[in-house]
Image (spheres, rainbow, N blue to C red):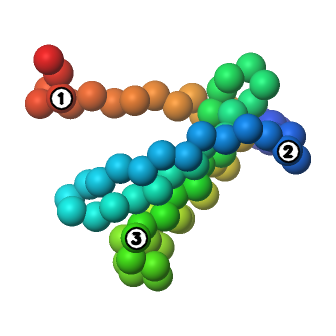
């Protein structure tokens, strides 16, 4: 098993908002000193809704995967291509 790469207790983060399917989300991403993403927080504007709980849980799972060595890759679908 790969060991977990921990983030510093105090670190710079980037917060941004976006909308998907009419739902507003706020995301915060923290990075390691080398620039790699190591943590993601995600919330939905409808607190404690199914969408909010799923977003928060997915962000936790993603953060743990990143800290254990997974690589963040943006997937593009054919419709997203120029």
The residue pinned by badge 1 equals 80
Task: Using the rendered image of the protein, determine whether residue 66 is visible from the camera's viewpoint.
Answer: no
Q: Are marks 3 and 1 in contact (CB under 8 Å)?
A: no
Q: Quickly name the residue at label 3.
A: 45
* Left or right: where 67 falls relative to 14: right
Q: Is residue 13 above or below residue 78?
A: below
- For residue 3, side relative to residue 14 (left or right): right
Q: Could you classify mark 3 by the number of other residues whose Cα lies within 10 Å: few (under 14), some (14-19), or many (20 or more)?
A: few
Cβ atoms at labels 3 and 2 below 8 Å apart: no
Marks 3 and 2, Cα distance to the nearest angstrom?
Answer: 26 Å
| Mark 1 crowd level (few <14, some 14–19, many ≥20, 10 Å Cα) | few
Residue at (78, 25) in percent of width and height: 33
Picture quadrant of residue 61: bottom right
In the rendered image, residue 59, in percent from the top left (x then y), is placed at 54, 55
Residue drawn at (55%, 46%) of the image: 15
- Residue 37 figure quarter: top right
Question: With 64 as the anchor, is 52 left or right in this view?
Answer: left
């Amino acid at each position: 098993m790969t060991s977990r790469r921990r983030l510093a207790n105090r670190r710079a983060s980037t917060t941004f908002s976006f909308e998907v399917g009419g739902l507003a989300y706020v995301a915060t991403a923290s990075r390691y000193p080398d620039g790699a993403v190591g943590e993601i927080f995600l919330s939905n504007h409808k607190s404690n809704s199914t969408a909010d709980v799923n977003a928060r849980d997915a962000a936790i799972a993603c953060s743990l995967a990143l800290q254990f060595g997974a690589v963040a890759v943006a997937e593009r679908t054919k419709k997203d291509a120029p």
